[in-house]
Amino acid sequence: MQSLNRIAYISIFTAGAISLFVVESLIPQPIPGIRLGLANIFILLVLLTFGFREALLVGILKSVVGSLIIARLLTPSFLFSISGTIMSIIVMALAVKYLKSVSLVGISILGAETHTFTQILIATFLFFGKASFVYLLVPFVLLSLITGSITGMCTYWLYERTEGKIEFAKAP
């Protein structure tokens, strides 16, 4: 029964991440490539509640299924999304494990910064010249500080309300 509960909760978080990814894609972007990243709320919740593997699964499914729904699978946008998601989950997992004094908002900011940095690296080396990296880095990193803070505060708010209510779904 415990594994069924675990699967059910991870499925709900995955559906939430995909839904927010799709809804967020419908919001006009004043700056191309800048999104709030609200789907990452669910990824961070899964990371905190279930662990790295499950968070990675939710993140990959969010990028693949979400991109399929909005017809961007296997496009540069998809490449940016999945690479940034994977790298940010790795960094957030390391932060959760080793940086005990960093707040949930701080962990979210680390994830947002990593996501942005990864996307800029991929854009620079696959699509633009090396000089563009320097020009894109500063404004995008500043914007990801803001978006990471918003995502972190939302995650904190939800985590406080769900902590203990889904503990029974954790692996033994």
Image (cartoon, rainbow, N blue to C red):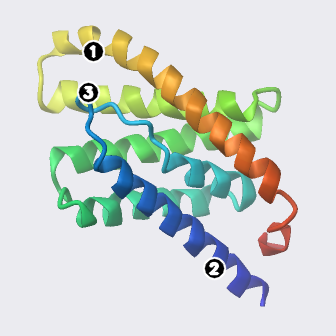
Q: Residue at x 57, y 37 (%)?
A: 151
Name the amino acid, label 3: Pro
Q: Is residue 120 above or below residue 48?
A: above
Q: Residues within 10 Å of mark 2 (few under 14, many from 20)?
A: some
Task: Give the Cα distance between marks 1 and 3.
Answer: 15 Å
**Which of the two discs, 3 and 2, sits closer to the camera?**
3
Q: Residue at x 43, y 62 (%)?
A: 19
Q: Quadrant of residue 2?
A: bottom right
Disc 3: CA contacts within 10 A as few (<14), some (14-19) or many (>=20): few
Residue 99 in picture, x, y percent from top left: 76, 30
Q: Sequence-wise, which precedes: disc 3 or disc 2?
A: 2
What type is the residue that disc 2 sits on? Ile
Question: What residue does disc 3 label?
Answer: 30
Image side of residue 112 versus residue 44, left or right: left
- Name the image quarter holding residue 63: bottom left
Q: Is residue 168 left or right of residue 62?
A: right
Residue 55 at x, y = what percent?
58, 57
The local crowd at label 1, few if under 14, some if 14 to 19, many if 20 or more residues have their Cα within 10 Å, is some
Give the numbered dot on residue 136: 1
Q: Quadrant of the N terminus?
A: bottom right
What is the secondary structure assignment of the residue under circle 2? helix
**In the rendered structure, which amino acid carries the disc numbered 1?**
Leu
Q: Earlier in the sequence, mark 1 or mark 3?
A: 3
Q: Which residue is mark 2?
A: 7
Indicate the secondary structure of the residue bearing disc 3: loop
Residue 71 lies, with reference to residue 5, above or below; the image says above
